[in-house]
Image (cartoon, rainbow, N blue to C red):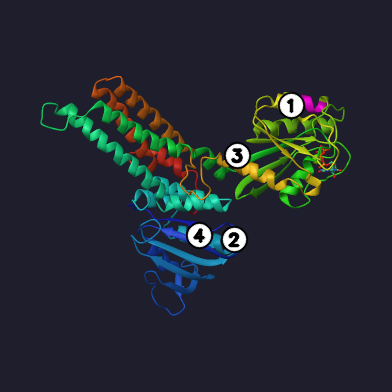
Amino acid sequence: MYDDTIAAVATAMGEGGIGIIRISGENALEILNKVFCSVKKQPVENRKLTYGFVEDNFTGEKIDEVMAVYMKAPHSYTAEDVVEIQCHGSIVSLRKIIALVLKNGARLAEPGEFTKRAFLNGRLDLSQAEAVIDLIRAKSDKTFDVALSQLEGSFSKKIKEIRADLVDILVNVTVNIDYPDEDIEVITYENLISGLENVKAKVDSLLATADTGRILREGLNIAIIGKPNVGKSSLMNALLRETRAIVTEIPGTTRDTIEEALTIRNIPVKLTDTAGIRHTDDVIEKIGIEKSKESFNKADLVIFMVDNGSPLDDEDREIIEYIGDRKVIVIINKTDLESKLERDKIEEKLPGAVFIEAAVAKDQGINIIEDEIENLVYGGQVKQNDSMMVTNVRHKALLEEASTALGDAASMAEAGEALEFLEIDASRAYELLGEIIGEAVNEDIINEVFARFCLGK
Ligand SMILES: Nc1nc2c(ncn2[C@@H]2O[C@H](COP(=O)(O)OP(=O)(O)OP(=O)(O)O)[C@@H](O)[C@H]2O)c(=O)[nH]1
Ligand SMILES: [Mg+2]
């Protein structure tokens, strides 16, 4: 427990129906009693909402009409005494009340400090605390579900199960090292190898969800590229279901890249429509084309669009060269027109590509494009309703290291090396998995995790 009391505005600092100031620590109730005056002149009770006013206890000025609630330790967000004051959601009121609370002895909380206290007081483990920030930032139903299940402890439970398996192995190994002459069950290398491989397989199956998890969390960056007039902006509008980008029959209509956020099948997506790539003397268009190439380089997924109604030309070929061996979806657009395009020539140059035929202006093929995007994200590995997913880069890195350490231990066992050697790697894996849930982690890591939070959480 800490001896200082922290406070912050917990709601967004804008205009809203209500705004909440949160106070946590030993003096939370004492501070509330100094600045709050219940209408019925009754004391604030634990877990009861009380109606009253915040008044400046130095000047007597009435600040706002509020509701106040006190949550006694340990049954609160931080597991300390917590007070929340619900005032009107005006910046003026929020600023005045927080200033008054600070004047009465609270310290302004750092971003994430409430959640950090919940962690340090043992109410949440580290991966649960990290789930809080994911919940706040979730942009799609799916990301929210994954974060919620992580907050409820499903991910921690999985990690704990894996660690428990590993402990069994480690105990066995240690006993055989320390008391080889005692009358104990002698460990066989066969058992050891299969045990270690089993644990590694569990770690790896979690890791397999990481790419999908990252995309669901951060969003998928998609760039639509192609020569002028193939229908890139038409596709952007069709996916957005609104007329966002200007579409005309004049090649070179889009001169600057256009970015929009949307969700496709519940996957958060950042979609970029780009200027058609071609040789031009137009200064503005040239800059636009440079930006198209940048978007291409940054994209997780590239949609390359070609025109079914005209033969493959040098402009297409140049873009194909530029794509190289990047993974792309090729959209053959304008299938309502008579085909003049040699599809086999593109297939030859881009052997790994997925081909989709569409007539975007006629709203044909949009569904198939969305299907394909969904397929690529889930990669066939993760079922859509699976809410156990690695979404956090810190977790991913630790799981990767643990997997390597377990692999090393298993191959040492296979080579028949002394138990002492493989015990080192197996315990290392155990520690790495512990870091995910915050067992035995050093202060720097903890600070780094909570530095990513927003104020008031
Ligand atoms: N026939 C037919 N025309 C289409 C189709 N899709 C788009 N178009 C037309 O093609 C023209 C160009 O469409 P845009 O979406 O502006 O093409 P763009 O690739 O963004 O072009 P730039 O911005 O110039 O690079 C417009 O006249 C569209 O109506 C289609 O499926 N069939
Ligand atoms: Mg365009």
Contact, mark 2 vs mark 3 (Cβ under 8 Å): no
Q: How crowded is mark 3: few (under 14 residues within 10 Å), some or many (20 or more)?
A: few
Circle nearer the N terminus (2, 1): 2
Query: Residue 297: horizontal and vertical position, in percent?
Result: 67, 30
In the image, residue 408 above or below residue 129: above
| Residue type pointed to by label 3 | Leu
Q: Mark 1 points at which residue?
A: 320
Contact, mark 3 vs mark 1 (Cβ under 8 Å): no
Spatial CA distance of label 3 from label 1 is 21 Å
In the image, residue 424 above or below residue 111: above
Q: Does 216 sit left or right of 82 as displayed?
A: right
Q: Does the residue labelled 1 lie within 8 Å of ligand 1?
A: no
The magenta span reads 315-320
Contact, mark 2 vs mark 4 (Cβ under 8 Å): no
Spatial CA distance of label 1 from label 4 is 58 Å
| Residue type pointed to by label 2 | Ile
Residue drawn where x is 69% and y is 48% of the image: 367
Circle nearer the N terminus (2, 4): 2
Q: Ligand 2: which quarter?
A: top right
Q: Mark 4 points at which residue?
A: 98
Q: Does 176 sit left or right of 75 as displayed?
A: left
Q: Main secondary structure of the magenta part?
A: helix
Circle nearer the N terminus (1, 4): 4
Residue 395 colored magenta? no
| Residue type pointed to by label 4 | Ile
